[in-house]
Amino acid sequence: MRDPYEVLGVSKTATEAEIKKAFRGLAKKHHPDTKGGDADAQKKFQEIAAAYDIVGDKDKRAKFDAGEIDAGGNPRGFDPRQGGGGAGGPFGGGFGGRQQPGGDYHFTWTNADADQAEGFRAEDLFSDLFGGLGGRGGRGGGRRQPQVQRGEDFAVATTISFEEAANGGTRRVMVPNGEQIDVRIPVGVKEGQQVRVKGRGGAGINGGPPGDILINIKVAPHPNMTRDGNDIRMDLPVTLKEAVAGGKVPVPTLSGTVSLSVPANSNTGAVLRLKGKGIPAHGGQTAGDLYVKLIVTLPDKPDAELTKFVEGWPGDYDPRAKMR
């Protein structure tokens, strides 16, 4: 057998935690139950398990480092072909290991074996590694059987427009396995919510059900609108004439442009409501409303007639009177 430190890829000065971590990683990667019973994987796993049986056990590691036992756990000078009571392969003869000709080990544990292991319980480690792979009866004997496991959930993030979040729609996303799928975006979805696509995640193990795809939603900001629950709020610029004389003005909404009646003598900051023009009805909730705040806006370029009018207008009111 190869040097167990070399098999596990650790140095002779490695700590117990480092050795255990290396073993866990290699065991997960090469366990035959995850490789469909591949013979090469089984041999590799046996070699890894045998190496860990030596250096993963404090007493055996000390004996190996001192040259008292070899890489197979046998006393120096012991010939395993002649039989006898050496420690033997993985989880050695003293731990219930059954060595077969050619080094084929069958991991059969008994309660007595576990008691002799002095705190080292491979069944616990394998249960931790493979989610409970094990024979019937817990610590009792019996060859371990693969456990049915649900597939992995795939988590992805996607950014949708303000309109998509309000009205719903379909968005194509790429999942970690490289597949592109069309996902239905529900009406009224919010920033930070999650859309679940059932059964399209990773494949199940040993006949288990597939996982899901979890899509984390981000909503791009709208240049004019903000969301307030199921209501929408926006600022609407109006001319001085529209504010003073009143009239009909166009307002963009999620469902298209509508006409809004501006009352005469409307000031900046006046809020008007368009009922049902917020987030559409969804999930048993009624549609929200659109709240429009008027912003009286002067022309970008100076208007000579407006200037002449204002200069001749008394303007004898104090707009700051309420501030006193």
Image (cartoon, rainbow, N blue to C red):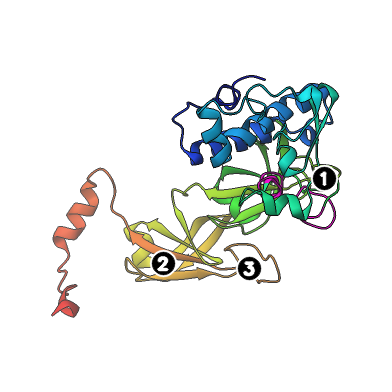
Sequence-wise, the earlier of marks 1 and 3 is 1
Magenta residues (range): 122-140
- In the picture of the structure, the residue carrying the numbered disc 3 is 287
Q: Position of residue 127 (x, y in %)?
A: 70, 49
- Badge 2 crowding class, 10 Å Cα cut-off, few under 14, some 14 to 19, many 20 or more, is some
- In the picture of the structure, the residue carrying the numbered disc 1 is 144
Q: Is residue 47 left or right of residue 219?
A: right
Q: Is residue 276 left or right of residue 13?
A: right
Look at discs 3 and 2 and give the one toward the viewer. Answer: 3
Check disc 3 and give the amino acid type.
Answer: Ala
- Quarter of the figure that contains the N terminus: top right
Question: What is the number of the mark on residue 246?
Answer: 2
Residue closest to the eye, 156 or 187: 156
Sequence-wise, the earlier of marks 3 and 2 is 2
Give me the residue at 49% from left, 36% from top: 18
Magenta run includes residue 133:
yes
